Image (tube, coloured by chain):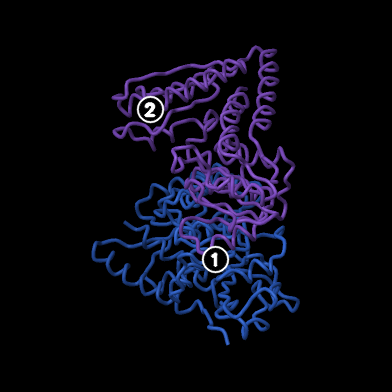
Chain colours: A purple, B blue
């Protein structure tokens, strides 16, 4: 039976860090504040916002809501972001995306100050990782995957890690974080040939393909450590990872469940970034 | 006997492209011009400059030499770069590095306009590759390695490629160029464990460790394609690649010699960038 690499204890540890940091900041008369920019009333956005507000409240982080009509023009949105950039009362900025199609999203995210880019929206933040500069905010999802490894004392030095995803949001930044820990990283993707032989050779497999239950037993062995970053609906409409958890859990050494794994750490990291951004 | 992947025919093809492009530009009344910034009289710089000047002359590229005393201050150098950035008569800028220690080299290279950054000095140029944006100038060395594969019709789709180097100048941009061609890329480095098993499993091995003749027969098999980007002196003071060419050449499928391989393509690419930058 595999070790269950659950996200909850990792998230709890991060939340404790946040609470301690909030107390510390309070002594200096500072209060971390997250600005949330939402256009229109997309139900997914509203749901996500509510969850973040609840978390912020319980952790002592203030929120500053900016709700605008979805017909807002790019220029006006850029002005809003610029104002938030210079507002000393705002520690971090979160913009719900994707933005409506008429808005130049690339321009908007590149306007977010790297110092307040807690969700790593601006490519500058990811580029820092590429340059080996760890001073910026990493994207929450790959960082959450790394946090689960760290929490479970899974050493990366000299380990072979297969990353199955090559996007700028997950795969590439994850590869950079892994290289920083001296792992040997194989970046795989949909065009990779003979993936099972690569994943079987790897000490750790980190997948974010977004194809429910695609990876069965043939991809792993008894020493495999599996970090499942995928999130998609299976045939029955249930949220599932890339890995067929039920089929694999008795074979591999350790595995993250979905839900309850990587995804449950990301929001805590977003809020950790907010307190870290508060200076 | 391995196929010899020599750089000369690749460089010759690129030079022909440059000549054709120069003729085309001439019809529009344009002349590509490379600005070369050299501080002091470091013999390596002087030697390299002479070689570039000779190449530029034979290809019809103009040069604009900026020679300054090595005691120049950062601010003055920044002014020079800014002037070159806005000078319509300058297509590309090359600054000999490393710069003297008292100069803020990072600031200087970040000042070079990406449009004229023919040597990919500014991290912005490399970051574009990370974002999957191929509109900028790639660093000449990884691009030269890619050009040798292209010239020899070595397909990369779905191939396993081991890159032995994780620097921002070679390994990381090379990995991005390979991913763009749908290769599966393993980024290895000095901390990688059991490197021979990784290189033997790869279809193509691209190494830039800078340790003369480090890789012998045990790293390859009869299907290996070896691109040797390393350049260092061996025990006898001779310029050598990372691979023990003599030991390996009868085993592998194809290999670049050193010298005469990747290194002999880089200058042609630098000058190709100059004509491509001339608009």
Left-right relation of B128 to A149: left
Say whether marks 1 and 2 touch (CB < 8 Å): no
- Helix, strand or loop at disc 1? strand
Residue closest to the eye, A110 or B259:
A110
The residue at which mark 1 appears reads as B160
Is A52 located above or below residue A229 in the figure?
A: above
Residue closest to the eye, A98 or B260:
A98
What chain does mark 2 sit on? A
Quadrant of residue B59 within the rendered picture:
bottom left
Say which mark, if any, is on residue B107: none
- Helix, strand or loop at disc 2? helix
Mark 2 is surrounded, within 10 Å at the Cα level, by few (under 14), some (14 to 19) or many (20 or more) other residues, namely some
Q: Locate residue B243, reporting x and y percent.
A: 65, 75
Where, quadrant-wise, is the C terminus of chain A in this rendering?
top right
Left-right relation of B60 to B175: left
Say which mark, if any, is on residue A78: 2
Q: Is residue B37 visible?
A: no
What chain does mark 1 sit on? B
- Looking at this view, name the residue that lies furthest to the left: B27
Residue closest to the eye, B31 or A56:
A56
Q: Is residue B193 visible?
A: yes
């Amino acid at each position: 039976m595999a070790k269950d690499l659950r996200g909850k204890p990792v998230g709890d540890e991060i939340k404790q860090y946040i609470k301690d940091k909030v107390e510390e900041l309070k002594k200096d008369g500072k209060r971390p504040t997250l600005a949330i920019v939402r256009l229109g009333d997309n139900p997914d956005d509203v749901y996500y916002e509510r969850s973040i507000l609840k978390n912020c409240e319980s952790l002592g982080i203030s929120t500053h809501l900016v709700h605008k009509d979805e017909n807002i023009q790019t220029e006006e949105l850029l002005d809003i972001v610029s104002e938030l950039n210079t507002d000393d009362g705002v520690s971090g900025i979160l913009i719900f995306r994707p933005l409506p199609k008429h808005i130049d999203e690339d321009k908007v995210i590149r306007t977010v100050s790297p110092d307040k880019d807690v969700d790593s929206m601006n490519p500058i933040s990811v580029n820092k990782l590429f340059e080996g500069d760890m001073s910026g905010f990493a994207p929450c999802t790959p960082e959450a995957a790394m946090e689960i490894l760290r929490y479970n004392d899974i050493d990366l030095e000299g380990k072979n890690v297969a990353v199955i995803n090559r996007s700028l949001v997950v795969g590439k930044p994850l590869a950079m974080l892994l290289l920083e820990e001296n792992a040997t990283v194989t970046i795989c993707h949909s065009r990779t040939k003979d993936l099972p032989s690569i994943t079987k050779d790897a000490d750790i497999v980190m997948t974010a393909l977004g194809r429910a239950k695609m990876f069965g037993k043939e991809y792993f062995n008894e020493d495999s450590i599996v970090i499942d970053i995928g999130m998609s609906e299976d045939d029955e409409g249930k949220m599932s990872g890339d890995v067929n958890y039920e089929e694999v859990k008795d074979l591999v050494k350790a595995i993250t469940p979905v839900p309850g794994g990587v995804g449950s750490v990301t929001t805590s990291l977003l809020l950790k970034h907010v307190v870290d951004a508060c200076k």
